[in-house]
Image (cartoon, rainbow, N blue to C red):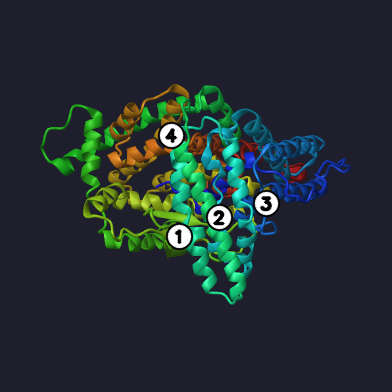
Amino acid sequence: MHHKIPTALIRKILLLCLYVAAFSACKKEQSSGPVMARDDAAFTRYEEHFLEDLWKLNPGWATSVGYHKYDSLMIIPNDKSRDQELKFAKVNTDSLSRFDPSQLSPGNKMDLEIMRSQLEGMQWNIETLKEYQWNPGSYNVIGTFAYILNENYAPLEKRLRNFYQRMAFIPAHYKEAEKQIKNPVAELTDLAAEQHLGGLSVIETDFADSLKKTKIPAAEQKLMLDRAAASVVAIKGYAAWLKALKNDKPRSFRLGKQLYESKFKYEIQAEGTAQQTYNAAVERKKHLHREMTKLSKQLWPKYFGSAAMPKDSLDLIARVIDTLSAKHVKPNDFQQAISDEIPKLTAFIRSKDLLTLDPSKPLVVRKEPGYMAGVAGASVSSPGPYDKGGNTYYNVGSLAGWSASRAESYLREYNNYILQILCIHEAIPGHYTQLVYANKAPSIIKSVLGNGAMVEGWAVYAEQIMMDAGFGNNEPEMRLMWYKWHLRSVCNTILDYSVHANNMSKEAAIKMLTQEAFQQQAEAEGKWKRVSVSSVQLTSYYTGYKEIMALREEWKKKQADKYKQKEFNEKFLSYGSAPVKFIKEAMFTTPKIDNKNN
């Protein structure tokens, strides 16, 4: 399912606002003073100033990571606010250049590089990408309001008053958005209208329902509801304006090679280029097809007896996968099957000694909350970096109310084999386990500017270490179905690059996904929609996985007969959600302090 963690998803939405954000009215001096000391203590102090200024520029993003000082504020997106953003980026790039990386601890050195890359990316977004002109969805503010309403970080009355104060900015925000948009991407325009109208209930009904649960005086409640009504008018007005917009020369949704390479550089922070990663993914797909052909030939007699084997290898693989996909749970048992999987995964990891799991941080399995409903399957909700003690939830969707044919198609995709792999990816030892380790790393920078390719790459790598350790009793069926699932990550990269940099058509994309990645038609159609409204993020799964595997091979060579998988896994995770290339550098750098022990 490769669900994004909901808080991370909110952060992605809010990251879009980075291009249209600026300082709030209170103009505290930015971190431009001379950095006298250059050691770790000075750097830690500097980081605190950096983050404080970043949150003032981006109050919505701050809310989503659990920093609630600016919950009542919103930035109006205009030329002035973008200028403030650029000034922040340039001033802080200058401040960072005054630190000598060789004088910093490996963790702080990583933070410095991550911050530098973030600041360069900010400048590139504003000056070159200019998404504020062509992506009307980048102005969507509803996600932050949903967060304030749904996360219990403060008493309800306090959260509702912040919600009310924040709504004061909504009419001006959308008036300004209309001035900024020029020849927008048609697909993104449609999506923005749809998402604004789809999210309206947060302000239109959920806010009023929450008010009823409080002792806020009636007169004050009336003011709050009046402002909510005015906000609804502004948001509906923006959606109507988008639908009526005369757009004779819309920008193509395809980024083009040059912008794609730059965006890949800033977002993925890989060792190689987007083109090199694409080339590697094409080779990986060929390798997977060869392995899947071998396994399908081996399994054919078991499932088809003496029936003639298809000559075409892709047809052969598809027939075997189709037969195995019939093994799935009943719609009503879907949630229970996922809940039952967690203790099995935990026991397997302990028996194979793959990783130390922290028993004091259990994963809370729960039915998907109402405000997240609509996508069945599984996802992880994690506490923000400022609330490391909060619960981590494994949200499990329900198929209740689905038609029999829709449920059947879905369950064939998430059959008994894939369901187990999904739990590995989302929970243990995937996203959830990585998160527990990341929360132990002291750096907040790595949490708030976390590298998506490392996070997703680890979850894909986690699947492989489980398969290699014999998960699923070493059955060829399990390995074949993991290859099918793994092809999804590989083909995400091929699809994204082919569409945005090489003009791949919708027909060619659907054909590749259904015939070469063995996906259901509905799955492929959904992926086409995703690639037409996003770029680069789809490459994060395979890129991160590829780099972790390459790093492990190098580490094995260095360690020789001292190599232990568990040690590698734990050392890798100990650095937090940093780009793999920075973790690699830290792992291969011997700290000066350790010389006497070597």
The circle drawn on residue 444 is 3
Asked if the residues shown at circle 4 and circle 3 are in contact, with their CB atoms under 8 angstroms apart, the answer is no
Q: Residue at x 58, y 60 (%)?
A: 227
Q: Which residue is mark 2?
A: 231
Task: Answer left or right for 296 relative to 131.
Answer: left
Q: Which residue is mark 1?
A: 371
Q: Amino acid at mark 4?
A: Ser
Q: Position of residue 472 (x, y in %)?
A: 33, 51
- Nearer to us of marks 1 and 2 is 2
In three-dimensional space, the C-alpha distance between marks 3 and 2, rounded to whole angstroms, equals 34 Å
In three-dimensional space, the C-alpha distance between marks 4 and 1, rounded to whole angstroms, equals 25 Å
In three-dimensional space, the C-alpha distance between marks 4 and 3, rounded to whole angstroms, equals 33 Å
Q: Position of residue 453 (x, y in %)?
A: 53, 40
Query: Crowding near pointer 3: few (<14 within 10 Å), some, many (20+)?
Result: many
- Nearer to us of marks 2 and 4 is 2
Q: Secondary structure at mark 1?
A: helix
Q: Which residue is mark 4?
A: 532
Task: Answer left or right for 578 relative to 392.
Answer: right
Looking at the rendering, which quadrant does residue 306 occupy?
Answer: top left
Q: Position of residue 564 (x, y in %)?
A: 54, 46
